[in-house]
Image (cartoon, helix red, strand yellow):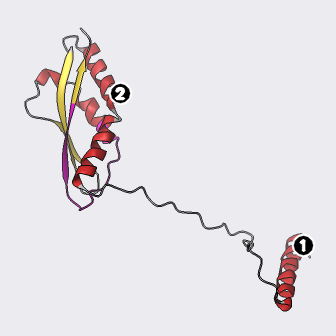
């Protein structure tokens, strides 16, 4: 008889003798060999419950990427020295699931300041946005201002 079979028989014998003596079950039950314990599942983070909370959360996510947007500006400035400043408002439209529908610039932004939109678009699309609490599409405007310091 192998060592594993002997161990299983020993555990079974202890359990039977404990039951026969009226002893309580052990506080911790052994997990059968070859079966992993069930993983503990953490609750997902609480999403926003109001439109204002959602707007604030989206702005915070966009704000967290400001260094990436700044790099977009520096790259545009280095490629085209005439770009010394940028004042641009990006418009992000989200599906109720948080998936991005579009990332555009607000109307009225001077054309020469939009050279970096491809880079910004890519940066924004890398963000995971929260679901809308009431299943609605959301549009958020986020202003960006950068200067080369000249």
Say whether residue 83 is visible. yes
The picture places residue 86, in percent across and down from the top left corner, at: 19, 22
Return the disc, 1 or 2, that comes first in the chain's sequence: 1
Q: Quadrant of the C terminus?
A: top left
Image mark for residue 71: none
State which region is magenta. Answer: 124-143
User: In this rendering, is residue 62 above or below 98?
Assistant: above
Q: Is residue 39 left or right of residue 66?
A: right
Residue hosting label 1: 2
Q: Magenta span: helix, strand or loop, mainly?
A: loop
User: In this rendering, is residue 81 above or below 73?
Assistant: above
Q: Residues within 10 Å of mark 1 (few under 14, many from 20)?
A: few
Q: Are marks 1 and 2 in contact (CB under 8 Å)?
A: no
Q: Residue at x 90, y 72 (%)?
A: 2
Residue 78 among magenta residues: no
Q: Quadrant of the N terminus?
A: bottom right
The picture places residue 129, in percent across and down from the top left corner, at: 32, 48
Q: Residue furthest top?
A: 150
Question: Closer to us: mark 1 or mark 2?
Answer: 2
Q: Secondary structure at mark 2?
A: helix
Residue hosting label 2: 67
The picture places residue 25, in percent across and down from the top left corner, at: 77, 81
Query: In front here: 136 or 126?
Result: 136
Q: Give the quadrant of residue 14.
A: bottom right
């Amino acid at each position: 008889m192998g060592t594993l079979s002997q161990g299983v028989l020993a555990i079974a014998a202890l359990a039977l003798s404990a039951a026969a003596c009226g002893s309580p079950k052990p506080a911790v039950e052994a997990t059968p060999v070859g079966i992993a314990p069930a993983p503990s599942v953490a609750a997902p983070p609480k999403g926003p419950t109001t439109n204002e909370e959602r707007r604030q959360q989206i702005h915070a996510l966009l704000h967290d990427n400001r260094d990436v947007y700044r790099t977009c500006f520096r790259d545009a400035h280095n490629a085209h020295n005439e770009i010394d400043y940028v004042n641009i408002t990006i418009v992000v439209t989200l599906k109720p699931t948080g998936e991005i529908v579009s990332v555009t610039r607000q109307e009225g932004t001077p054309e020469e300041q939009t050279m970096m939109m491809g880079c910004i678009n890519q940066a924004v699309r890398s963000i995971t946005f929260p679901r809308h609490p009431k299943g609605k599409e959301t549009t958020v405007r986020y202003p960006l201002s950068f200067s080369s310091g000249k």
